[in-house]
Amino acid sequence: MGCTGAVVGEFVKKARQSLLLVKRTGLELYNLEKEEEGSARLVMVSEVQMNGIIVSCAVLRLSGLNQDALVVGFEGLKAAILIWDQLKYCWRTEKILAFSDMMREDNVGGEGVVTTTLQVQPGLMRGRVVSEDDALVRSDPIGRCFLAFAKQSSKLFVVPFSTSRVCNAYSDPKEMLKTEQTFWIDLEEFGIRNVKDIVFCEGTFEPTIVVIYEPIQTWSGRVAIHANTVFAASFTIDTFKRSSKKIWTVSSLPYDAFLCLAVPEVGGGGVVLVCASSILQIRNGVVTSGLYTNSCGESLIKLMEDAEALSTGPISKAGCIADLETAKACLLRDSGPECSVVLSLKGGELYLLTLPPPSSRGGMQMIRGSSSVPAAQVVAFRDNFFVLASRLSVSVLVEYKSKRETLQNGESHPVVCGEDEDMQEVFDENETEEPQQTVTSWSLKKRDALPMMGPAADMCIGRNERAEAEEEEPVPEGEQKTPKFFEELEVVTGGGMGSSGGVTILERSLRAEYVTKRDAIQLQGYRSAWTLGDPFARKVARKARERRNTSSRTRNERIRKTNEQLLASKESWKIAQKAEREKLLRDQMQQRKVEREEKEMSEEDKRKEEEEDETVLVDAIENMKRDIDRAAEEQFALQVEEPLEETPVDEDELNSYLLLSANDSTVVLETGLEITELVEVDFRVDCPTLTVGNVLGGRASVQVHKEGARLLKGRRLILDHALPYDSGIVGAQVLDPYILLRLENGLVAVVKVEADEEAAQAESQGKDITSALAFGESLMDEYGGGLNGLDELEEDESIPNVKVTQVFVTDVHMHGFVTAACLYYGPFEKSRFADSPVSSTTGNEDVASMEEDEEEYLLYGKIEDQVPMSVDMEEAGKRDSLEEAGLLLVANREGELEIFETETFELIVRCRRFYLGPTTLADEGEAAGAVTPDADLRQDGGAPRVVNLTMAPVGPNGHGFRKVPVLAAVFQHGQVMVYLGFSVPEECTKGELSGRSRMRFRKIVCDDVVEQRGESIRLVSFRNVGERAGIFVTGKRPFFIFADRGYPRLHPLRIRPDSEVTDFAEIHNVICPHGFVTVELDGTVRIGALPGLDDVVLDSLWPLRRINLRCTVSHFAYHAQTSTYGILASHYVPQARDSVRKSIKEFSSQVQLEKEKGEAQGLTVSGVEEDSADASALGTKDPRKFTGSLPTLMQEKHELRLYRPDTWELLKTHSLKDFEVGLAVTSTVIDVYKVSKPAKESPRAQQQKGEAAPSLFATSVKLRPKHMLVVGTGYLKGEDSSSRGRLLMFEVSKQERFVGDQKVSTFQMQLIAERELKGQVSAVQALQGYVVVGVGPKVEVYKLVEDEIVCCSFFFAQLFCTSITSLKQYVIVGDMFKSISFLYWRDRNKSLNFLGKDYQPLQTYATEFLLHNDDLSLVASDGLGNIQLFNYENATVAESRGGTRLLANGGFHLGSRINKFQRVRAYGNMAEDSKGASQQLTMYSTLNSGLGALVPVSEKTFQLLSALQAKLAQSPDLPHLGGLNPREFRKFRPERTSHQLLNQRLLDGHLLLEFHSLDAVRKKEMARQIGSNLKEIMSTFQSLDTALTRF
């Protein structure tokens, strides 16, 4: 979703700021990670969804608390105080406030406080529903209180914090956040209404606020009389006496003021008032400085200066012209000695404002910076960073630097430089009227961007063209081709504005680019795969490549010399041929001249023939030159140079071998330019292989089989290590230098392989070596001789003596029979909590310091933090980073998880209830007793057994960014659990945590892949696939675990529907750099690669690609025949104001003359110029007239664009007329008709004779259908002109031809027909070969007769059609205010027939059909964020009013406005039911960047999920953040309270997916309570998730 707000606070830890982004109903927490010079990024810490719409939020900075708290305001005058739980790594609710309930209670207060309330009906206050108000929260800078403002009722609620709290570094957050009795202030008692903004002042003794309000509002037609109508008032709030007092008031401020910023104490205090055309600074009720940015602001400033009793400081003209309307701003606290403000305008322009120091008499300085994205909020972040949180586009992290410069007279003003395409350089470098001696220069650099889908202005579903291109392969015998309706689809949404606008392509699964074609490698019976690197083979390949390149260079040198000789010969030959042929031509012309002289001809005829001969000679010479050039190219053809082989990427990491294992054998393949099988190798190939890996820094490899392990150098054996006992090996893992062996008897052994330097030294001295295995040059010579060139290797590349150390984990306090184990090396916190939470100082010093802090708080209202404020935040971030560590993780049969350190095999973490899948995994220590599985789990044979376990560092590669530890486990029933590792800060030390590990794990709820299925599910970690490190989970629905921004995301891999991946391995070779290998159940081996970091965004629920089209995308449609997208787009172009004045003058004069004379006559241009001159002259005398510069006037130009989806290349465009706006577009098949019998006489002549004139409809016959793009438009010319629109039909065609061996496609888009209609065409849809359109209140049906659009039917709807949806002969019409109507198209008599409608008022946004077997339902969305489900019943149902009323059988509050529905056929088990009927789901997109689906289910499934939803809503195991009830939030919110739903047939999928966050015991208990079992519930979730696998 798009960002609706942002705040910065020390939420996770003191002295380390974090960024919190608000996204409608969600909260996202980020940290700043800065490693290398010039590289910085935002790392996600947490993501959470709330059951309410977040209106505002503020940071609570409480002294003495080691972290900041967050106060969030919701709809309905509700607020909650949240704090980051450092032990559980999530948000925790500390306090819930419902201010609407407080208004119905008695309050006791002092002056300015309303003490009683009216005795009214509960829920009502002065005739207004209180729950409809929103809570706008603001917090005191030093945490004395916070406010919640109800804008509609003008009530200000004050929540003071307790002053009796004990302040120290280990204070309990509950004690620190303890509040006093809340009271509220009625601002209307002070004459304050229409509040625009409220802000807390900084550096004040008591909490002080400044309120910006407009007691008497003005409007555009009233500005000439009432322009300065805004007031600013300051209040102090006494939290002890619960009273307030007004300090000062400033009146006559510009009416366009809308934003207020608090200036810090170092900058002199006060506030900065931002207006649409000016900026003012107010201190102690006096306007100390300001500036205006255009002539509108200048006129308002003059009026303000003329007002009585208003003292103003220097107010100057800005150095640049700008329109600040709806701008967002924030204060840059660390921008230098002066305070500075960054402004983000609605068009994305950035401006930097420098405030004058308190002791200076100078004015403000404002310069223009770079252009970026339009921001919904701007916040300063860390040192020299600020964030542009955008709702329309990506959110950008910007680094800024400021420098003070002294300029001489005449020098230009310093400008801001941007070093990115999104941060373009300044184009406006104006000088101020008075040269500044000392100015501030700025430099802005874009460091990171958070991609997002953007507001979905429209959505469509099209074929995945990349998938279509890759699947053009022959189908093997015995297999059936995939049905066409199971084509892979992609969702395309459009959003953004201006240069940041574009489209977003979303796919549910990751699509890999496979190097091998389908079934290119087919090995029956092989299920596992591994890759190995061989430095000696890489050396041989490198030398071979160098030899080939050397030979190629030699040949190329000879070719170049030969080509030079050919070129010289060709030029000589061409010169000779041209001279010879030209001489011959001229001789012929001379002969003709001689012949003419001999003839008797007039001088005029001779002159004409000479001119003709000259012309013929010139043409002949040109033709001759072309023939000679063509002949020279054929005779002297140049040779083509051979291309050189490039050095592979990361050559030292290339893999040389690929091992595949079956049940009884192993095959070794060599991976190079070709994949070939190796026969003469020392790998054991007569038995299955358990694992393979590189050791000794990649110089050797290890093969583990059931009986032991082999150590090899390349292909040759070094050591054959056998087990010293009878138990065989059932599982293994290689992680240099360790080899993990899991035995049949439940034991675990760790073998360490390392180079024995002492043995090597002893061998060099001639001593006898018995404790180590040595190999000499003889083995190297034998090995090198078999590889054709390894004898040239240097001696330092030989492997020293190898020492093998074996350790049994049972000797280090191992507990129980081991079922899964793994090795890990990466970031991990090995330290433990201290034994005592107190510091090393004496107790008396602590008590004295605490008492001194309390006294300081009571006197001055603030406490110095325990952490010094001079601590560098970057150093604090480095201390919090996890160090690299090697670990051994073991899961036993009892469901316990134990983590050991590999160096000493010390037990670090022990979690006894790992089998339950708890939300947080923590070290439980050795003191607790053994854990017995619960009773209901004991019935199933004990605790769920862990069958596979892995832990790996996950994250992007490169740029020095750190990775995060991710733990994944697979249980015996196929359930996959994913945990994110984190470290608890040292400040959280408590008595019960003494001696415990600081490392913990937070469960990541897997909403998408809930249960994996397959014969053997494996977890494979990889280091570099597609520039990412992660984990792969095999099975019938394999998926990746990535963490591009530090937060794990699960993304399925696209495979064939009937296939199953049994193993996965990463591969890096010449043909597939940093790719992967998958082995499928039928033995198919595929080699492919994933998109890189810059190609696809994986830090989202669905992988997405953002295509910037640099235009505002409003509507688009997918043309299936040509696989193209038709997009209605617009862009802004500058327009001269004089031309606008002329057009307005001409238009108004034209309208006036039409009224008086009845015909249109325009004014002359000279008359208009004189009027403009007079207006300009008057403007110099009247300050209300605009005399100076104005912002550039922009005009929006609309056009239809045609794009191809594979490259998003712009193919064709069609510009609409001036003032014409594209309102709707659809792709449809239209039947083309032709007039069969032309009329003998014109229709008008027949009417004059009294005969009935036959229409085109009656005399036309159907020819053929055409695939077209149909566009509906409307003209926006103002209120004085009548509403008009056009209906346009475009034919799009595609021609393919071959240029050599390459297929080239050309596209054409041609306007076939158009028709102007008496109304705006707001909706267009196909209807069985016709086009049904919404024209104002009418619904009309048109058909195409040759090149003319003919109306054949119409139906009067209600007020204004907003959407039209058709399915066969059924039509749904959505109205702007009157809900929906259901129509039926009868082709027999070409008429639209009314079936039924909804009689309740509804502001309809989108409509669609919902199909399930033979049931047909109607779906509609409204302006309040609801979804309604309607059904059409016959006249026998009493509620249907004789069959004319649509019955509302479901209502659901989504919280976002749905702008588009689209049906698509389901996939998997839901594609067809038992009767063979097709199933369809309805996708939708919202204006808040949301994407979802309505999935129909059977009655049995609905009853099961309905009972489960009721239990989840009441479950105490699911504490809802902020105390918000999901049932209350999702409850249908009608426009009228009398509207009632007959049934509720819609379920909350988000709440149902919370079932996966419960542990195993709670899941089984809840399933038993609803009369089901866990297997049935998980199978239902699996089928619902499978329905979306087409994307």
Image (tube, rainbow, N blue to C red):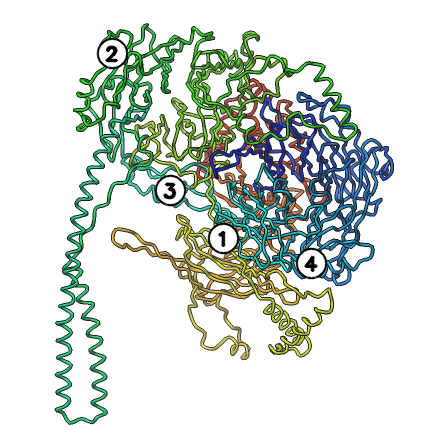
What's the residue type where badge 1 is placed?
Answer: Arg
* Image marks 1 and 4: residues in contact by CB distance under 8 Å: no
What's the residue type where badge 2 is placed?
Answer: Glu
Q: Quickly name the residue at label 2.
A: 763
Residue 1402 image position (x, y, % from top left): 66, 48
Report the mark closest to the observer, 1 or 2: 2
Tell me the crowding category of disc 1: few under 14, some 14 to 19, or many 20 or more residues within 10 angstroms, Cα based: some
Q: For the residue labelled by badge 1, is the local secondary structure a helix, a strand or a loop? A: loop
Judge whether 694 appears above or below 440 on screen. Answer: above
* Residue ID at (43%, 14%): 903
C-alpha span from label 4 to label 2:
90 Å
Report the mark closest to the observer, 3 or 1: 1
Residue 1540 image position (x, y, % from top left): 69, 40
For residue 1389, say whether it is visible: no
Judge whether 1245 appears above or below 1460 on screen. Answer: below
Q: Quickly name the residue at label 3.
A: 467
Q: Quickly name the residue at label 4.
A: 297
Circle nearer the N terminus (3, 4): 4
Report the mark closest to the observer, 4 or 2: 2
Report the mark closest to the observer, 1 or 4: 4
Q: Specify whether 815 is left or right of 658.
A: right
Circle nearer the N terminus (3, 1): 3
Report the mark closest to the observer, 2 or 3: 2
> Can you say which quadrant of the picture contains the C terminus?
top left
Q: Quickly name the residue at label 1.
A: 1110
Looking at this view, is 1472 or 1324 the one in front? 1324
